[in-house]
Amino acid sequence: KKIIFSGIQPTGIPHLGNYLGALKQWKHLQDTSDKADSLIYCIVDLHAITIPRHCKLLAQSKREMLAALLAIGLDPQRSTIFHQSAVPAHSELQWILSCTASTGYLSRMTQWKSKLQSQSLSLSPSETTTSNPALRHGLFSYPILQAADILTYRATHVPVGEDQSQHLEFARECVTNFNHTFGSNIFYPPKTILSPAKRVMSLLDPTRKMSKSDPNPKSTILVTDDQQTIKKKIRGAVTDSGNFVTYDPERRKGVANLLEILSHLREDGATPAQIAEEMKGEGLVVLKKAVIEAVDAELAPIREKYAELLANESYLKQVQRLGKEKALKKAASTMRMVRTAVGLDD
Ligand code: TYM
């Protein structure tokens, strides 16, 4: 029996990277998994507050993310869809895991190191990274909370994009540390499931991943973008000076990214190289046109459903309550085992 768990931060509408790299896979797993398997999808609001934002904005983003997950076809009856902070066990388990987690390992995490680097670049010479108030502990211990999310449900499989691989490696380390320290075997290492679209690149800089934190909206396509916006963004995608179609991910990263996006949307499973072969002799306009059509066809039903759902406040509330109830129940059964293993029973 599989227990599938994954999470997404409510920090804006999901983009094509989130969709192809994770959400489409979540839906696929929902549609293809065995009835006995559990599917648990979490909107990680506690992770989102590592970058402080106005409370009203967070509340709105949480609602929007719930609507987006339903719009892509997640079924609240089949899957457990909920907000992380509705289940206090995540925070409790985070503390327990932090008592056996290595700070050395945490300080080697790429996301932390890049934060450290970008922060220290902005420091004056008299300041040090250790005295920098912008380096918050929540960002440092972020991976422990992520491990707690997964382990609260004793998940066996975690579908994510490639940028989460290191965090999942760390979650496996947390399992080893916990089991070793408390002489228990209640946790087992969760497996990473990488989708074929494990790393969708920015439309403006194909050497960087498409990212929600990119300040330029033209670098991403949101799953709710309308046809005109999709057209404009893909027409403006940075390629190179060669006006012909070849699949060369080393030397032609921009063209390769477009071919890969198209390949992930093709139902016949054509590879990027095969699509490039089909377009032999054509210019990049033809490739971009095909990408626009494929992306728009995929996203049109999602944006329609999204608009409908967002207007239906009472339905969203109902889904939220149902998800919370189901998640609380599952979490309680793990936490009973954890408390016994640690010796925290009453
Ligand atoms: P987040 O919110 O940044 O992203 C959600 C999912 O989208 C994937 N993703 C991408 N995939 C391909 N190409 C891209 N350009 C791209 N950008 C994002 C991410 O890999 C992710 O799967 N820390 C996590 C959230 C989290 C979580 C968890 C995930 C919290 N707890 C437990 C799994 C299990 C994050 O910030 O994802």
Image (spheres, rainbow, N blue to C red):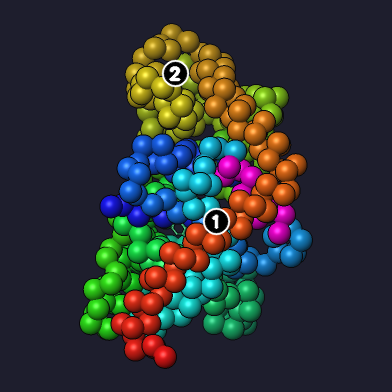
Q: Which residue is mark 2?
A: 245
State the residue in front, 322 or 247.
322
Residue 276, quarter of picture: top left
Residue 170, quarter of picture: bottom left
Q: Quadrant of the C terminus?
A: bottom left
* Farthest-out residue, top: 281
Q: Is residue 46 visible?
A: no
Residue at the image position 53 percent from the left and 37 percent from the top: 73
Q: Which residues are magenta?
A: 59-70
- Counting from the top left corner in percent of width and height, residue 135 is at 58, 74
Could you tell me which secondary element the residue under label 1 belongs to?
A: helix
Q: Is residue 298 visible?
A: yes
Residue at the image position 47 percent from the left and 16 percent from the top: 244
In magenta segment, residue 65: yes
Marker disc for residue 323: 1
Residue at the image position 53 percent from the left and 14 percent from the top: 286
Q: What type of secondary structure mainly makes up the magenta span?
A: helix
Does 186 appear above or below 43?
A: below
Does 217 appear above or below 282?
A: below
Residue at the image position 51 percent from the left and 46 percent from the top: 77
State the residue in front, 291 or 252.
291
Disc 2 marks a residue whose amino acid type is: Val
Could you tell me which secondary element the residue under label 2 belongs to?
A: loop
State the residue in front, 315 or 111.
315
**Disc 1 packing (10 Å; few <14; some 14–19; many ≥20):** many
- Counting from the top left corner in percent of width and height, residue 117 is at 52, 66
CA gap, disc 2 and disc 1:
46 Å
Q: Earlier in the sequence, mark 2 or mark 1?
A: 2
In magenta segment, residue 317: no
- Counting from the top left corner in percent of width and height, residue 284 is at 52, 18
Disc 1 marks a residue whose amino acid type is: Gly
